[in-house]
Image: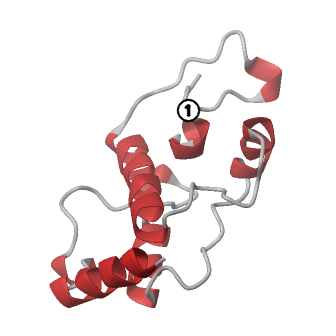
Amino acid sequence: MCAAIRWCAPELIPPQEDVESFNPRLTSACDIFSFENVVLQVLSNKLPYYNIKHDSYVLIQMRKHRPKRPPHALSDVHWEFIQSCWGIEPSLCPTAEIDPSLRPTAGEVHQSLLTLCKE
């Protein structure tokens, strides 16, 4: 099982009925999912699932829902990019070879960092 639950891809969490025999497959999609949770934390200065206090509740929530958008922290472009990496179907998530049109511009990153520094 994943030790850092808030950053873990849901497909690495064993189903309740199959905990003992569960054998997760580590994939690049898992890495992309986790990376985007790190990006979310850096850009928003909030933990993934910041609105849920206990990790045990995060486990329950993450099977069906993705982290909430932190208020006032992310541009729409950043939020759309992060959401694209959280696809319900891992095979549909972007890879590290992402379309350049999906990447935030240097100006957008700069603006997000300025906003983050003000908080």
Q: Give the image location of residue 46, x and y in percent.
A: 55, 61
Query: Which residue corresponds to the image point at 32% horizontal and 83% vertical from the top-left?
Result: 114
Residue assigned mark 1: 12
| Res 92 visible | no
Q: Relative to 34, say whether 84 is above or below.
A: below
Residue pictured at 62% horizontal, 81% vertical: 71
Q: Quadrant of the N terminus?
A: top right
The location of residue 33, given as percent across then percent down, is: 44, 51
**Which quadrant of the view contains residue 105?**
bottom left
Q: Is residue 9 shown to the viewer in this render?
A: yes
Q: Position of residue 68 (x, y in %)?
A: 66, 69
Q: Count how many numbered circles sit on residues in the image.
A: 1
Q: Residue 15 in the image: x percent, y percent?
A: 74, 29
Residue appearing at x 66%, y 58% in the figure: 50
> Mark 1: which amino acid?
Leu
Crowd class of label 1 (few under 14; some 14 to 19; many from 20; radius 10 Å): some
User: 14 above or below 59?
Assistant: above
Left or right relative to 25: residue 100: left
State the SS at label 1.
helix
